[in-house]
Amino acid sequence: MSSEKKRKLTFSPSAAVKTGLLVFLASIGLMLTATVMSTAHAAAGSAAEPPVPEDVRAVVIDGKTAFYAYEPDIRAVLDGIIDDYTDGSTVSACFRESVELDAEDIPSGSQVLESGEIARLLDPEGGSAWALTVLTRRVESRAVTVPAATETVENSEKYQDEVRILREGYDGEVVLEYVLVCANGVETMETQIGETVTVEMVPEIIEEGSLPGSRTDSKGCYIWPTVGIISSKFGPRTVKIGSSNHQGVDIANDKGTEINAADGGTVIYAQNSHNGYGNLIKIQHDNGAVTYYGHLSEILVSVGDKVAQGDLIALMGSTGNVSGPHLHFEIRPNGVTPVNPIPKMTGELQRS
Ligand SMILES: [Zn+2]
């Protein structure tokens, strides 16, 4: 056998995966070794034996001779198997088993298998003892949503229960790239190899107050609940309609003028009083005082509501005993007895 020459034959899977193979060839190592008899050796064979055709090879799988076949047939079958498990996303493909085509020592008269039988024996899912396993690697991209984060900023001039969104947040997106390793098309391992931000995530910004207490706590002072002119003061008066001893102060303006809570507190009455007050709101304050807001055209709060000083609670009107649209406003410091509101008010009444 000293005259034999050996050469390495590299098995080349289909063109579809060749580009990727350049990258991964080192790890695949799909090398088929063939030993090819020299012409001299073939001529030296025994004259009594029928000559073995030159391109018959022993197919050696994991070191054991499986069968004999013509080299073009076995190569076509191997290519076909690889093709079955690869597509455009495949970057490399190889067999788990070592597959060698050996031209050495082929016994005379050996049965040479045809393509169909070769394919049946090597079919990865055919269940034969020589069934091959195709290992493939492919790259897969997956878009993943990055939920908007939340950032909080503190405002020391607002109460702890005052929370507002300063800026809306938006979800982002990243595309993750994976290499998937499959055996006969079944994924066995995945490794992340890349990450690309396609949509930048924008965090939501929330402002939170840090002052102890609540925005609806009573401040203990009163702001003018509306704008307009004082049309009737507190105390005795001579009128055709309404009380002759005026229990509050009247502030006249157009119907629909906004009415705000004079101080923070809890709404304890909000309905048509069916008396001279017409539509009436009463707010209970933390120090025991109650404020009244009468003749309203519209009531915008309900009993039990917590309101802060300055919150919109109603619209001016002329319900009850009135000659024109105005707000009848009372302060009852002990919750029962009205007093002149004007000395208790903070700042000047604005006309509009
Ligand atoms: Zn009045």
Image (cartoon, rainbow, N blue to C red):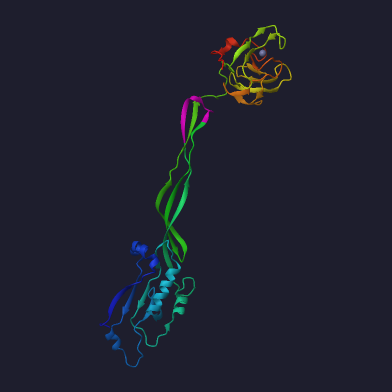
Q: Nearer the viewer, residue 77 or 95?
A: 77
Classify 126 as above or below 114. above
Q: Measuring 41% from the left and 72% from the top, which residue is drawn there?
A: 79
Quadrant in the picture for residue 237: top right
Residue 63: image location, x then y, percent: 37, 75
On the rendered image, what quadrant is the N terminus found in? bottom left
- Ligand 1, seen in the image, is in the quarter at top right
On the rendered image, what quadrant is the C terminus found in? top right
Residue 275: image location, x then y, percent: 73, 17
Q: Which residues are magenta?
A: 151-163
Residue 254: image location, x then y, percent: 62, 19
Is 158 contained in the magenta span?
yes
Quadrant in the picture for residue 64: bottom left
Q: Nearer the viewer, residue 108 or 159?
A: 159
Residue that protrudes farthest toward the right in the picture: 274
Classify 178 as above or below 223. below
Q: Measuring 61% from the left and 25% from the top, which residue is drawn there?
A: 306
Quadrant in the picture for residue 231: top right
Is residue 194 visible to the viewer in this orientation of the structure? yes
Is residue 27 visible to the viewer in this orientation of the structure? no
Secondary structure predominantly adopted by residues drawn in magenta? strand
Residue 133: image location, x then y, percent: 44, 69
Residue 149 lies left or right of residue 337; in this view the side is left
Is 173 contained in the magenta span?
no
**How many marks do you count on the picture?**
0
